[in-house]
Structures are given as structure tokens and as C-alpha cells.
């Protein structure tokens, strides 16, 4: 990795993925299918990496920038892709960032790698102007639910009937305020996330 990483933590360093690295991303998904088996009941499709590399939020959700980040091991450990983070900057409102996907290689689970890498990601989005960080967790994905609660995220609303790529799920929207503004201020500026909201 000759480039300077955006952030580093948990033994992994984050770099924006290039289009020519899409096959490596697909290989990572194929080697670590647990998330996809949990939320969709099937392994990742063969073209998932290519789809996600180009995916942006739907038209009704304005945004500033989409980040597709690879989490790489240190050079002395082979420099291999060991995780992925999909981050949307300025979703719906300036200062609102969304963590769409965060996966660390299965072999690294239970070692503190995911927590350390997430902490570095959170520090990076703070430095970049984020005031709130949101995400969605598929209900029933117990490992993810517990992990994000430990990171300080709180539930806001549930979205039913969400197609996550093979199964219709209920998604729990969660938020972590990163600045002085609390959850009430966030909900006033992003009404779609208010509890009971019917907005998509």
C-alpha cells in the first residue's frame, strides 16, 4: 500500500477501492459469506462487488459522496483485503453520514479487530465533518445488533419490507450523535428517521 490510508485501527488500514480492485472485493465476499448467509439466507451473488461499487442512494435521498473503502492488513502481514466499509457522506443533510456496510474477515472475529477498525472509522468521519452517523441492522442479526449497541448506537425506527438482496427483512435504523447536537436535533432535521415514520 503506497497510498496514505484514510484511517487505521485494529491492525487494518482503510483505502478507497479502485475499479480494478472489484475482483478482489468479490473474492473477499466469497471467502467471507457469513453476513450474506445471515441476512439473505444465501451466499453473495457472483456480481455483488461490481453492483455495490457503483451503487448510490436512491434519488429521494440526496448525498454528497459515496466511499467504498477496503480495510487492508499491514504490508508485513501480506497487505491483503481483510474488510470492507461502505460509507455515504452527507446523506439527506450535511453532517449526516451513513455506514451502509461494515464487514471484517471471519477469521479476525473475536480479536478486537472490528472494534478497533470501527473506532478509527468513527474518528475519521468526525474529522471529516460528520455530526451524526447512522446505519441499519437487519433484525435477527444478533451479532451485529450487539456489536453496534456496544459502539454506542441507539435505535430510532424500524423499516419493514426491505429487500436486502435475496430476502425481505425488517431493518432497525440506528444513530450515534458525534457532536453536541443530540438525537432530537437529528430527528428534526431528518424526519424520515422519526419513530413510526412511513417515509422510505
Image: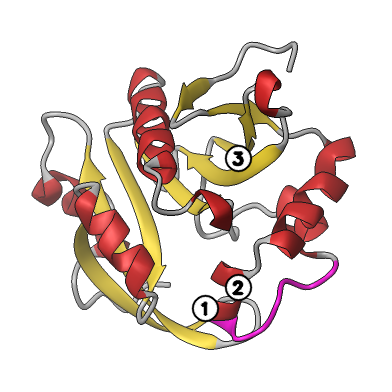
Q: Secondary structure at mark 2?
A: helix
Numbered circle sitting on residue 36: 2
Is residue 179 on the magenta stretch? no
Q: Which residue is mark 3?
A: 66
Q: Give the side of residue 152 with respect to residue 92, left or right.
A: left
Q: Residue at x 30, y 57 (%)?
A: 147
Are the residues tagged 1 and 3 within 8 Å (C-beta)? no
Above or below, 132 relative to 156: above
CA neighbours of label 2 inside 10 A, class few (<14), some (14 to 19), many (20+): some
Magenta residues?
39-46
Q: Secondary structure at mark 3?
A: strand
Are the residues tagged 3 and 2 within 8 Å (C-beta)? no
Numbered circle sitting on residue 39: 1
Q: Residue at x 26, y 64 (%)?
A: 146
Rounded to the nearest angstrom, the CA distance separating label 1 from label 3 is 23 Å
Q: Nearer the viewer, residue 153 or 34?
A: 34
Q: Position of residue 105 (x, y in %)?
A: 58, 52
Residue 153 in view here: no
Rounded to the nearest angstrom, the CA distance separating label 3 from label 2 is 22 Å
Amino acid at each position: 500500500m503506497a497510498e496514505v490510508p484514510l484511517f487505521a485501527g485494529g491492525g487494518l488500514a482503510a483505502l478507497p477501492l479502485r475499479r480494478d480492485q472489484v475482483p478482489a472485493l468479490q473474492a473477499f465476499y466469497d471467502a467471507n459469506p457469513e453476513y450474506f448467509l445471515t441476512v439473505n439466507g444465501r451466499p453473495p451473488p457472483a456480481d455483488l462487488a461490481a453492483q455495490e461499487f457503483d451503487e448510490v442512494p436512491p434519488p429521494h435521498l440526496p448525498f454528497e459522496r459515496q466511499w467504498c473503502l477496503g480495510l487492508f492488513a499491514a504490508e508485513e502481514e501480506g497487505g491483503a483485503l481483510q474488510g470492507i466499509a461502505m460509507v455515504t457522506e452527507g446523506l439527506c443533510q450535511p453532517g449526516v453520514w451513513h455506514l451502509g456496510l461494515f464487514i471484517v474477515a471471519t477469521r479476525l472475529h473475536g480479536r478486537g479487530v472490528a472494534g478497533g477498525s470501527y473506532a478509527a472509522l468513527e474518528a475519521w468521519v468526525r474529522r471529516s465533518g460528520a455530526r451524526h452517523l447512522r446505519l441499519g441492522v437487519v433484525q435477527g442479526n444478533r451479532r451485529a445488533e450487539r456489536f453496534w449497541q456496544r459502539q454506542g448506537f441507539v435505535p430510532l425506527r424500524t423499516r419493514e419490507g426491505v429487500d436486502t438482496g435475496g430476502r425481505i427483512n425488517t431493518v432497525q435504523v440506528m444513530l450515534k450523535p458525534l457532536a453536541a447536537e443530540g438525537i432530537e436535533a437529528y430527528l428534526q432535521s431528518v424526519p424520515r428517521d422519526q419513530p413510526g415514520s412511513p417515509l422510505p
